[in-house]
Amino acid sequence: MNHPPEAGLAKRLCVRAEAVREHLAAVVDSCDDAIISEDLSGAVNAWNRGAEKIFGYSAGEAMAQPMLMLFPPDRADEESEILTRIRRGESVEHFETIRVRKDGTRVDVSVTISPIRDGNGLIIGASKIARDISGRKRIEEQLARQAVELENSRLAWEAHELEIRKLNESLEERIAERTAQLKIAQHELEAFTYSVAHDLRAPLRHILGFAGLFVEEFGTALDPPALHYLQRIQDGTRRMGLLVDELLSLARTGQRSLHLQVCGLNAIVEEIISIVKAETQGRDVEWKIGSLPAMECDRVLIGQVFRNLISNAIKYSRPRPHAVIEIGQTERNGQAAIFVRDNGVGFNMKYADKLFGVFQRLHREEEFEGAGVGLATARRIVQKHGGRIWAEAELNQGATFYFTLGGSERAGSRGDAATAGA
């Protein structure tokens, strides 16, 4: 019996439709998202493996159960609102909410809900697609916390920076105030030193003069002890006069304004050596003069620095049968430094901090003469030029004195010079 062609076509279409349904069911079942459907009473009537994975219920446990089992108590009213909108034929497009797993833990989900219609177009239920977004939410919360922490850190840093700025401003004010006070005290001390030293010169000249006259007129009639005492008075007065002269020089240095000009240091050194060479008469002294730069400085004052340092080198190399005095330039910490070196008696470096103090001596006066003011004067001059001065030595191995010119105080020194020129 032959079947009509229409019957064969219908059968093939049924087979194909069944294959499509099975394929769609397989796709739905294999989806990682939860695909659920419910009827208009809110009972579950479809539950895929994605729903099992996200919510923990198997399909057998979930089927015919109320959808409210997935809602936390604080969100139960969402279900009635959803069903109301579905009955009106509205879709609920993609919103984020919270649902509850079988074990009671809460899960963040993104949900899309659409109405389900039968063959006649009547709404019979709703389909829901839910995606687990807990991982994303954790990242967002972590980022939000980090953003808050960063903002708090930024605010704390700004507050800290403001506090530091205030402290710096306060410190700068205190430093400026203290510097002004120190300058006033220094000027007052220099003025006092100058006044005292100047007023002492006349009495010392009188003592020295009358002692000389006394020895000249009555020396032959004096007993040897009396003559010795008078000679000691003269020697002491001469030393006192030298000390007064040194103090006056130091005071004048402090009060003198700088007169800056570009000077060749070799010319200054040659001039000083020609002056002090008389101190080397009868001695074997080897001079080593290197190439020195031209620098902006006060020629007279820097000449005084060289004179003090070179005279020291001559004096403290006196015990050497062959004295070597070297003057040159080197580099220290990226800055040009001038040095004066000798092969004399040197000194112990643990006493180096005393070198540049007034009246500080590292050798007995019986061995090496001097008032102990020359290096203090040299330091004062170098400081006025915005530089620094220091020494390196070994006992019985000679000494080297270094100094630099220019630096943070240079602008102020120029201001002094400009004021003096005005």
Image (tube, rainbow, N blue to C red):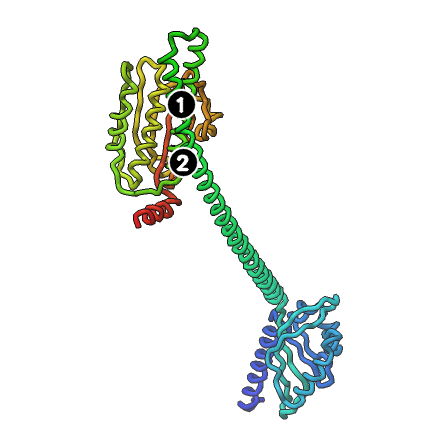
Residue 370, which numbered label? Answer: 1
> Label 2 belongs to which residue?
251
Classify 55 as above or below 216: below
**Local secondary structure at mark 2:** helix
- Which residue is at the front of the view, 47 or 354? 354
Q: Is residue 103 above or below residue 71?
A: above
In-image side of 368 versus 291 (left or right)? right
Q: Residues within 10 Å of mark 1 (few under 14, many from 20)?
A: some
Query: What secondary structure is found at the residue carrying circle 1?
Result: loop
Type of amino acid under label 2: Ala
Q: Residue 85: in sight, yes or no? A: yes
**Residue drawn at (54%, 53%), measured in percent from left and top?**
167
Position of residue 253 measured from the top left corner of the image (x, y, whole percent): 37, 37
| Residue at the (25%, 29%) spot, across then down | 271
Instruction: Locate residue 310, reporting x and y percent.
Output: 33, 26
Q: CA distance from mark 2 to mark 1?
A: 18 Å
Q: Quadrant of residue 308?
A: top left
User: Residue 269 in the image: x percent, y percent?
Assistant: 27, 30
The residue furthest bottom is 120
Near mark 2 (Cα within 10 A), the count class, few <14, some 14-19 or many ≥20, is many
Residue at screen point 72% across, 70% down: 100
- For the residue marked with disc 1, what is the amino acid? Gly
Image-quadrant location for residue 366: top left
Regarding residue 378, the answer to whether it shows in the image is no
